[in-house]
Image (spheres, grey):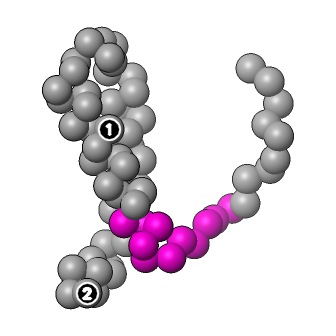
Amino acid sequence: MSEPMHELPESIVLPREEYRLQHAALEAALDVFDRFPEVDQGGAARRQVETALRVLLRRIWPFLDELDGE
């Protein structure tokens, strides 16, 4: 694998709308895996998406009531 082009920062803070978009994209990916299981026969991509979704949800969990109220 080639060297990364840029060093990633320790953390990234996104505006609420970008968190919503990230959440929607991860949920859409899981839906694709459910509807078309042949695209990820080994389940590796699903596991990565599920992990990313768990990390995102843990990060925004304290703010979910606020996000739902808007």
Quarter of image, res 2:
top right
Q: Which residue is drawn at 35% across and 32% down?
A: 47
Q: Position of residue 48 (x, y in %)?
A: 41, 35
Q: Quadrant of residue 17?
A: bottom left
For marks 2 and 1, the one nearer the N-term is 1
What's the amino acid at mark 1? Ala
Please state the total of marks drawn on the protein image. Answer: 2
Residue 24 on image: x %, y %: 32, 55
Quarter holding the N terminus?
Answer: top right
Q: Image point 37% across, 71% down: which residue? A: 60
Which of 18 and 1 lies nearest the eye of the viewer? Answer: 18
58 displayed left or right of 70: right
Assess disc 2: are there few (<14), some (14-19) or many (≥20) residues with their C-alpha within 10 Å of its C-alpha: few
Provide the residue span drawn in magenta: 10-20
Residue that carries the numbered disc 2 in the rendered image: 70
Rendering quarter of residue 38: top left
Q: What element carries label 1?
A: helix
Residue at point 80%, 50% (across, down): 7
Residue type for callout 2? Glu
Q: Can residue 40 be seen in this view?
A: yes
Quarter of the image containing the C terminus?
A: bottom left
Q: Position of residue 58 (x, y in %)?
A: 36, 64
Q: Residue at x 32, y 38 (%)?
A: 29
Is residue 36 positioned above or below 60 on the image?
above
Q: Is residue 28 left or right of residue 18?
A: left
Determine whether 32 is above or below 9 in the image.
Answer: above
* Residue assigned mark 1: 29
The answer to whether the residue labelled 2 contacts the one labelled 1, judged by CB atoms less than 8 Å apart, is: no
Instruction: Look at the picture and state if 49 lies above or below 14.
Output: above
Asked whether 43 falls inside the magenta stretch, the response is no
Disc 2 is placed on an element classified as: loop
Residue 35 locus on image (x, y percent): 17, 26
